Amino acid sequence: MNTHARMIAVGTIVGAGLFLSVGSWNQAAATGSLSCNNRTVQGSYGENTSGFISPDGGVTQIPFTGMGLFKLDGKGGLTGSDTVSIGGTVFPRQFTGTYAVAPDCTGTITFTDAYGNVGHNSATIVNGGDAAYLISTNPGDTISGTARRVGSFFFGN
């Protein structure tokens, strides 16, 4: 996989993956208990992500930002598209993948972009599934972001 294709994959992974682990303990403390599953996040989400990607596992850090839309089917499948800027070069992308949500409202996402690149992310679902905090779990990447359900109104960090 060439560096350009790797960078595109990383951005897609982070955008979608970031949706699904960072604040679930706060939600648990506030409510006393959690109960999430794949249906909790069914629907369309807008996402924004930023940070740095590393095509070589951490030595080189390239600025990254992205935004887009993705749809979760409530059964563990996802589709979406986004636009990313990697080192100042802008790319549109499409992707498909899978996700899994645990009862504690944390989750994982694996997806493949149209270039064949595979990405991995972790997420913490908050506000009953209306939003999530996201982070890339690819070695060397430092990308995080948020996703919000399309049509929801959310105040928060």
Image (cartoon, grey):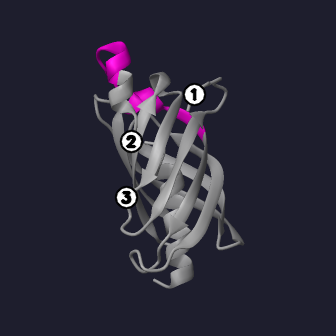
Residue located at (61% from left, 24% from top): 155
| Depth order, front residue of 22/13 | 22
In x, y percent, where is residue 123? 41, 43
Q: Amino acid at mark 2?
A: Gly
Q: Amino acid at mark 1?
A: Gly
Q: Is residue 37 visible?
A: no
| Depth order, front residue of 60/106 | 60
Earlier-in-chain disc, 2 versus 3: 2
Closer mark to the observer between disc 3 and disc 1: 1
Q: CA distance from mark 2 to mark 3?
A: 19 Å
Which quadrant would the N terminus be assigned to in this image? bottom left
Which quadrant would the C terminus be assigned to in this image? top right
Q: Amino acid at mark 3?
A: Thr
Q: Which mark is residue 156?
A: 1
Label 2's element?
Answer: loop
Q: CA distance from mark 1 to mark 2?
A: 26 Å
Judged from this view, the residue extending furthest toward the bottom is 2
Label 1's element?
Answer: loop
Q: Which residue is mark 2?
A: 76
In x, y percent, where is residue 154? 61, 25
Q: Which residues are magenta?
A: 28-45
Label count reads 3
Label 3's element?
Answer: loop
